């Protein structure tokens, strides 16, 4: 689903400065994550890493560490940049406790952009899944 904030006082697109259009698009638009891949974690059949991302630029992503329970796959931690109210270069994670999403936390490492973030997040979740679940 694509959605955007609108204002009753908004100007027509033709009269808006290009810089403002770009800033508004980055700030207010949430893009559909239309690509997905599942990565089983080595050594177990009950843990997987689910990676979702948008095809459109700027790329929004979510990387989920999931554990199989009697109820099915449950997310334990998600790392993302996918928030309509934040810039896409803000990378962070959320833990889930008793099925409830917790406030955002900074990633435990530095990243140099989206591709770097995704690669490091997948490696972090795969290497540390026991401690993170």
Image (cartoon, rainbow, N blue to C red):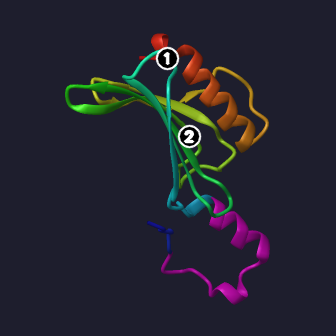
Q: Quadrant of the C terminus?
A: top left
Front residue (pair 85, 7): 85
Residue 108: name its quadrant.
Answer: top right
Front residue (pair 85, 132): 132
Which residue sits at x=61%, y=59%? 27
Dominant SS in magenta: helix
What residue is disc 2 on?
Answer: 80
Q: Quadrant of the N terminus?
A: bottom left
| Highlighted range, magenta | 7-26
Secondary-structure class at tag 1? helix
In this rendering, the label closer to the viewer, 2 or 1: 1
Residue 48: name its quadrant.
Answer: top left
For residue 26, above or below residue 85: below
What is the distance, in whole Å, between disc 2 and disc 1 at their CAs? Answer: 17 Å
- Give coordinates of residue 88: x percent, y percent: 65, 49
Local crowd size for mark 2, using a 10 Å CA cut-off: few (<14), some (14–19), many (≥20): many
Which residue sits at x=59%, y=44%? 81
Q: Residue furthest left?
A: 70
Answer with left or right where residue 104 lies relative to residue 22: left
- Give coordinates of residue 131: x percent, y percent: 48, 10
Which residue sits at x=56%, y=64%? 29
Secondary-structure class at tag 2? strand
Front residue (pair 77, 71): 71
- Give coordinates of residue 53: x percent, y percent: 57, 51
Local crowd size for mark 1, using a 10 Å CA cut-off: few (<14), some (14–19), many (≥20): some
What residue is disc 1 on?
Answer: 129
Which residue sits at x=54%, y=80%? 9
Q: How many callouts does the rendering have?
A: 2
- Give coordinates of residue 118: x percent, y percent: 65, 37
Q: For residue 88: magenta?
A: no
């Amino acid at each position: 689903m694509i959605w955007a904030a609108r204002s009753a006082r908004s100007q027509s697109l033709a009269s808006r400065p290009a810089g403002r259009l770009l800033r508004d698009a980055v700030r207010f638009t949430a893009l559909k994550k239309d690509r997905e891949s599942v990565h089983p974690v080595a050594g177990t059949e009950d843990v997987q890493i689910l990676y979702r991302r948008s095809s459109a630029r700027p790329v929004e992503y979510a990387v989920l560490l999931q554990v199989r329970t009697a109820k099915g796959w449950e997310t334990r931690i998600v790392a993302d940049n996918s928030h309509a109210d934040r810039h896409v270069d803000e990378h962070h994670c959320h833990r889930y406790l008793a099925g409830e999403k917790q406030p955002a936390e900074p990633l435990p490492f530095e990243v140099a952009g989206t591709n770097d973030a995704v690669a490091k997040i997948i490696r972090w979740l795969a290497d540390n899944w026991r401690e993170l679940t």
